[in-house]
Amino acid sequence: MPLLTSFDLQCRNAPDRPALIEGERRLSYREVMLNSERLAAHLASRIEPGARIALALDRGIDAVIAILSVLRCGACYIPLDIKNPARRLRFIVDDAVVHCIIGRGNPPEWLDTPALWLDIDRLPESAQSYYPPAATDPEALAAILYTSGSTGTPKGVALSHRALHNFADWAARTFKLNADDRIASLAPFHFDLSVFDLFSSLSAGASINFVPAGLTLSPSRLTAWLREQRITVFYTVPSLLGFIVLKGGLTEQPLPDLTTLLFAGEVFPTPQLKKLCELLPDTDFYNLYGPTETNVCCYWPVDRARLDVDQAIPIGHPACASELKIDAETSELWVKSVNNLSGYWRQGRLTEALEDGGYYRTGDKVSLNERGEYCYHGRLDRMLKCSGYRVEPAEIEALILQCPEVANCAVVGIDDSASGQRPAAALVLHPGGQLNGIVKTVKQALPAYMQPCRFSVMDALPLLDNGKTDYQTLQRQLERH
C-alpha cells in the first residue's frame, strides 16, 4: 500500500476533522490535502520523480505539508535541522546532491547554490490545486535521515516507502490509534521517532498537536500543556520523561487523558520509570527499541508488576514482523525487517548496508531472558546515545584533530542525568596550544547534542598494552574530573 493511501482515505471520509494543530493555527484534513496538493503540483513542475528534496523548516504544520507534498510527487524528503551549524548543513546538502530545498524567506548564507531554494510562502498563484499521488515503487526512497557517522561525517540512512509504511501501519494497529486520538509531536523530523508522529497519526485520522518550542526546558509547563490539550498519545525519549518525573508536577496536575506513552532512543532507568508509572496509573507504557536503520524492531509493553529498581527493563519481543537473531560469538543483535534501510546514502548514491540475507547488524549486545524476551546490554562499539540522538565519538574526534593545536584526542561518553550520556573530550595539545580556539571550532561545526560537555587537557592519553587508547580508563578519569 502506498505511504499516503491511508491519509488520502481519511481526507475523503472525514475532511473536516482536525489534522494539524500548532498553537492557534488549526488545519483540517481537507485543508492539509489542498495545501499539500498545491505544493506538490509546483514541485512536480521543477523536479523529476525520485528527486531528493531537503526541508529547511521548523517542526510544525508547514514542514508536514512539505513532507506530504514531496511524497505526493514521487520525490524523497531530507529533513534538515536548521539549528545545526552551517558547515554541517552544507555537508548534508552537498552529500545528498539535492534537487531542491524548501524553506522560508530568502536563501540562507550557508547555501552555495541559491537557485535550489524554494520559498514556501512564494508559490506562484497559478499553481494548480489538485495533484493525485504519483505512482511510486514501494522500494523507492521516501526519506533520508542523516545521523552521526563513525567515519567522521554525517551519514544518510535511506528509507523506502515500504519501510516507512510497514512501521507506521504496525504502530497504528498495535497502539490502537483512532480518529479521537490527539498525538503530541515533539520529535524533530530528522529523528526517526517522527515517523510515528506523522504517518501513524495521519493514517488513523488522529490530530497531530505540535509541542511548543521551549517546553522541554520547563517540565511543569510541558505537563500543563499535555493536560490542556488533552493529549492521548505521546512518543518521546526517556531523558525527557525522567525530567518530568522530577519536576513535572504530576501530583498536582495529573494527565487523565493520556492513554498511551511510548518511549525509545535510550535506556529508561527503572527507578524513574517505576515512579512515572505510579504517577500515571491509568496510562499504558511501551518500551520501543531499534536504531534508525531498522526503526522499531523490538518492543515491550511495560509490566508494572515486574519493575525492579535493581534491574533494567527488557526491550521485549520482535516488532513489525521483524526476524531477530543473536550472533553466537559476540551476542550482537541482527535484524531482518521490512523496516530496514535500503542502504546508506553517500555522495549522491546508495551504498550497501545489509548483510547477506537482508540482516542489519545493530552493534548492540543483547540476550534472551527466561521469558524469551530480548534484553539490551549496551553497545559493542563506541556509539553514544544523547537524549535519543546517536552520537559517534569518531565524528567529534575527526573534527578536533583537524585543529593544528591538537596532537591527539579521544572522545568518550559519561553519564548525565538529564540526557543519558554526554560526550566528553580528552586532548593532548602541541606546546603552546590553547583550548579556546578548539572549543570555538567545535561549537561552529557540531549541533549542541554532539558538543562535548567537558574538555580535559592531558599530557598523554591512557593506553592499553597493544598501544591503543584505553577508553575505559579514560572514561573513569573524565567522570572523576
Image (cartoon, grey):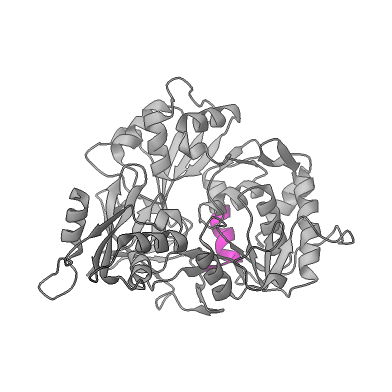
The spot of residue 68 in percent (x, y) is 69, 57
Furthest residue toward front:
432
Q: Horizontally, is 396 left or right of 256 in the view? A: left
Q: Residue at x 40, y 49 (%)?
A: 387
From this viewpoint, which residue is outermost toward the right?
Answer: 126
Between 443 and 148, the one nearer to me in the picture: 443
Instruction: Report whether residue 380 is seen.
Output: no
Number of marks? 0
Does residue 282 appear left or right of residue 412 in this picture? Answer: right
Q: Position of residue 424 (x, y in %)?
A: 29, 56
**Which one is nearer the viewer's eye here, 422 or 337?**
422
Q: Residue at x 27, y 44 (%)?
A: 312
Rendered view: 183 above or below 294? above
What secondary structure characterizes most of the magenta part? Answer: helix
Magenta segment range? Answer: 158-169
**Quadrant of res 81:** bottom right
The image shows residue 241, relative to residue 352, as above or below, that is above
Q: Which quadrant of the view contains residue 246?
A: top left
Q: Position of residue 291 (x, y in %)?
A: 42, 60
- Kindly identify the residue that appears in the image at 39 percent across and 76 percent down: 355
For the N terminus, which image quadrant?
bottom right
Between 262 and 100, the one nearer to me in the picture: 100
Residue 435 visible? yes
In reply to whether residue 166 is colored magenta, the answer given is yes
Q: x and y percent of residue 86 in the render?
A: 54, 64
